[in-house]
Image (cartoon, rainbow, N blue to C red):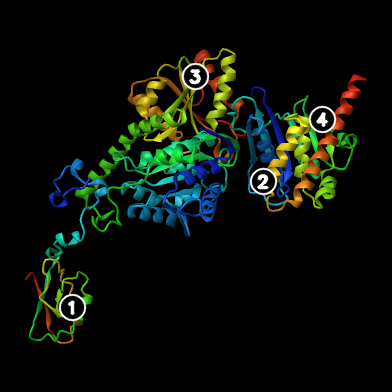
Amino acid sequence: MNNGIEIRWHGRGGQGAKTAALLLADVAFKTGRSVQGFPEYGPERMGAPITAYNRISDGKIRVHSNIYTPDYVVVVDETLLSSVDVTAGLKRNGAIIINTPKSREEIAEKLKEYSGRIYTVDARKISEETLGKNFPNSPMLAAIVAVSGVMDRKTFISEMKASYQHKFAKKPEVIDGNMKALEMAYDIVWSAMEDDKMSLSA
Amino acid sequence: MAIKERMSGNEAVSYAIRQINPDVMPAFPITPSTEIPQMVSTYIANGEIETEFIPVESEHSSMSAAIGAEAAGARSLTATSSAGLALMWEELLLAASNRLPIVLALVNRTLSGPININCDHSDSMGARDTGWIQIYAENNQEAYDNFIQAYPIAEHTSVHLPVMICQDGFITSHAVENIELMEDSLVKKFVGIYNPEEFLLNPDKPISVGPYSISNYAMEAKKNQEIALENSKAVILEVAKKFKKISGREYGLFEEYRTKDADYIMLIMGSAAGTAKQAVDEMRARGKKVGVLKLRVFRPFPAEEIANALKGCKVVAIMDRCESYNGNGGPLGSEVTSALFCNKIMIDTVNYIYGLAGRDFTVDETKTVFGELEDMVVNGRVPEQYKYIGLRK
Amino acid sequence: MRTDITKINEQTGHEHLTEGLMIFAGGSSKLFKTGEWRTSTPVFYEEKCRQCLLCTPVCPDSSIPVKDGKRADFDYDHCKGCGICAKVCPFGAIEMKEGVE
């Protein structure tokens, strides 16, 4: 695929990984690109491991298969690390983003086979602080946007604000919390990326 | 002005239904087509369309009600998948033989067993000889465009047959992709107002529909139905031509993708055609003369046209997303080889069965298939004539 | 598409039959003389009849015409000779006879 990026999401049924993939397709669409957002379906129920995918490209997307060599992987639930091979096929120059209170070093210990970039976001904590509930998909969405560079922070934030204003037209009180969650997660990942650049140049 | 949007295949078909505003929709939910009646009933609840929604107790009833409504004079439709279509079987034949231009949004899903909810074409292929026109889509855009073209084809005076608009379950029905929508007024004008010449709820011109026919009449009726299906080929092309004028998008009985000078052609239907095209581009960049023939219209079967389109190549891979259990290949395998033989196009073919019950079909597998075709011609290694790809060994 | 169905018969070629064998007329069953199937025939004795009209609604082929509150003689074009009317008549005003009358 030309100029395209491929993303694989791992989550559990009910956590919103599919919704997050569709939201990412939504915001990427607004930048004028070709997008795909699709879940891998089975008879899964609440709590069962699920996979969802995104393709984002400047050119037309025609492939209709699953993604086996993703540029990025997003893990919405840390407990999946022990049961699912989340880094399978992940490109060397790609990155994995994990929802966890643990540090990157602690996660690297768990993903011994994997030598690429790791970013961690405590999406649960961010979500509970900003929304009072555990909705990890908004922070994870912001994290993948930051890491993949699908769009810049300003565009992302303004697009998401418009989207939430539409989505939560009858519950405007949750808009601020969601926006705060997005900004916090974006900035955490962004500063980790800045640290990486510093250590590379040092 | 085209409206640039992103939506799933089910959303796209529901959007087209909203724009057409048909009269009656009886439906019963079944994965993965459930979203269509769900979205349409939301449009109805919101007062956006006047369609009469009939909740029924089974698909046997949804097609029966669609037949009754259509015969009464109402533009009717329903949506289903898999076992739902199988339960409609008897009524599918009635809809066609009573010459009722019903449209069915089919979201392809395998038939049991083993029980499974994912995509293959065994449902629509099982209904391939019920007298319905069958049109398949590669993506959400085509599902939308095909649905808009369905009523003008079905209701054409030289056709009067039901149309099945097929798309791949989950692969396109639940995948959000870019799409170009048309304005409501343009779609309404294209589809037009339904004015049947004869209908049951017309007290001034009484009719009987579906009478018992003794043998002296029934065979003649079947021949007439077959003629209508043959007629539909020209109508499908005529409607596509008109559709191009308003949308800019071109449709035929099939699409020929880089086949002109191709030595090896893959004949395939549905969403996997996009995957195959991607493989073709990558192989062409390495100098391989490969191409894809994407079949859009399976019924009526464009036998002569396909044979002509394939005559310049060395080998054809005929891809079936369905096992027909005839012990000799898939349905496309049987029909395409018969088309080649009857038109005296004596080229080699290999019939591949792929993607059953949601098994993924990839760019790499497409390349493997082309590799086998080349190996056959260049090195004389003839593969089995009927084989599975993507099968775990 | 509308065709004069009285001109269609078992010798008509397929191209002249109607679409889906649709019948372009109301009450066309009148044209079909089911009376030809009869092997025993009801005979109506008007003098015994009290005009109770029990026979009319039980006739499966609507072959007992009623006019001005009184039943008339049988419609032998359509009566199949089932004999239900004779069974239901309390006054012996209907008798079944072997053969075609």
Farthest residue to the right: give it: A202
Observer-side mark, 2 or 3, equals: 2
Q: CA distance from mark 2 to mark 3?
A: 44 Å
> Are dots 2 and 3 on a single chain?
no
Per the image, the residue denoted by label 3 is: B258
Q: Which sits earlier in the primary sequence, circle 4 or circle 2?
A: 4
Res. B245 image quadrant: top left
Q: Residue A116 at x, y = what percent?
A: 82, 27
Observer-side mark, 3 or 4, equals: 3
Nearest to the observer: residue A177 or residue B306:
A177
Judge whether residue A86 can be spotted in this image.
no
Up the image or down, B162 lies above or below B27; here it is: above
Residue A125: mark in rendering: none
Q: Chain of mark 2?
A: A
Q: What amino acid is labelled 2 in the image?
A: His
Which quarter of the image is occupied by the C terminus of chain B? top right
Query: Which residue shows up at 43% across the image and 28% down it?
Result: B254
Contact check, label 2 and label 3, Cβ < 8 Å: no
Query: Which residue shows up at 81% across the image and 39% down it?
Result: A183
Per the image, the residue denoted by label 2 is: A166
> Are dots 3 and 1 on a single chain?
no
Residue A114: mark in rendering: 4
Residue C85: mark in rendering: 1
Q: Chain of mark 1?
A: C
Contact check, label 4 and label 2, Cβ < 8 Å: no
Q: What amino acid is labelled 3 in the image?
A: Arg
Q: Residue A198 at x, y = what percent?
A: 90, 24
